[in-house]
Amino acid sequence: MTRWFEDIVIDEEFALGDHTFTQDEIIRFATQYDPQYFHIDPELAKESHFGGLIASGWHTVSIGHRKMVDALDAEAERLRAEGRSPGVSGPSPGVNSMEFKAPVRPGDTVSYQLVVTSKRPSNSLPGWGLLINRLTAVNQRDELVYQAEIVGFSKLRDYRMPLGLRLMLLLAKVPGMARILQRGS
């Protein structure tokens, strides 16, 4: 998230944009990354239980992730244009859940949305907060095709490292002190 942890509003919706999946794109992605017959062979796919060619779930995820990164970059630019400093995003420690709810077919237009559902200061990374995000994707028929709960770090703007921790970090830089400190713990 390109907002400071303190500025993130729970349940605020971020429309990430739409993408129309074409048959050529579906085949090209799947040929390179997920070459199962129902993703790459329109004729064989007709005989599958899907009844035709479908996009790889990883294709749906990749497009959504790209849309999310582009939207976060645009949000940072918007904040800069307003004379505000954007927050600092961190890495993701993981994905809690991921579900492919309905197949994405050639010609489907999928709309992606991100919502921060909860947040808390990190227990393991001082100065950072954890965001729990829900990423959803719906097709033009308003059918949910994909959803995930992803976790991400966001920097705290107003974080000040506690004095004890600052002293420990300074002492750890003194030659030989790191060994002494390790014996004490």
Image: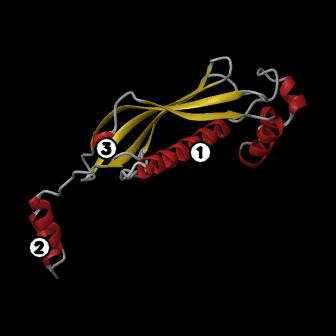
Amino acid type of disc 2? Ile
- Residue, disc 1: 66
In the displayed structure image, the side of residue 60 where residue 69 appears, left or right: left
**Residue 1 got which mark?**
none
Residue in the picture at 13% in, 57% down? 162
Q: Residues within 10 Å of mark 2 (few under 14, many from 20)?
A: few
**Residue extending farthest front:** 82
Residue in the picture at 59% in, 38% down? 64
- Residue, disc 2: 180
Helix or strand or loop: what does disc 3 sit on? helix
Amino acid type of disc 3? Phe
Kindly check if marks 3 and 1 are in contact, taking CB atoms under 8 A apart as contact.
no
In the displayed structure image, the side of residue 120 where residue 72 appears, left or right: right
> Percent x, y for residue 131?
36, 39
Q: CA distance from mark 2 to mark 3?
A: 36 Å
Foreground of the two, 99 or 20? 20
Residue in the picture at 34% in, 30% down? 10
Q: CA distance from mark 1 to mark 2?
A: 47 Å
Helix or strand or loop: what does disc 2 sit on? helix
Foreground of the two, 116 or 8? 8
Foreground of the two, 37 or 90? 90
Amino acid type of disc 1? Arg
- Residue, disc 3: 5
Number of disc labels:
3
> Percent x, y for residue 137?
59, 28
Q: Which of marks 1 and 3 precedes in the sequence?
A: 3
> Percent x, y for residue 87?
36, 50
Considering the image in quadrants, where does the N terminus appear? Answer: top left
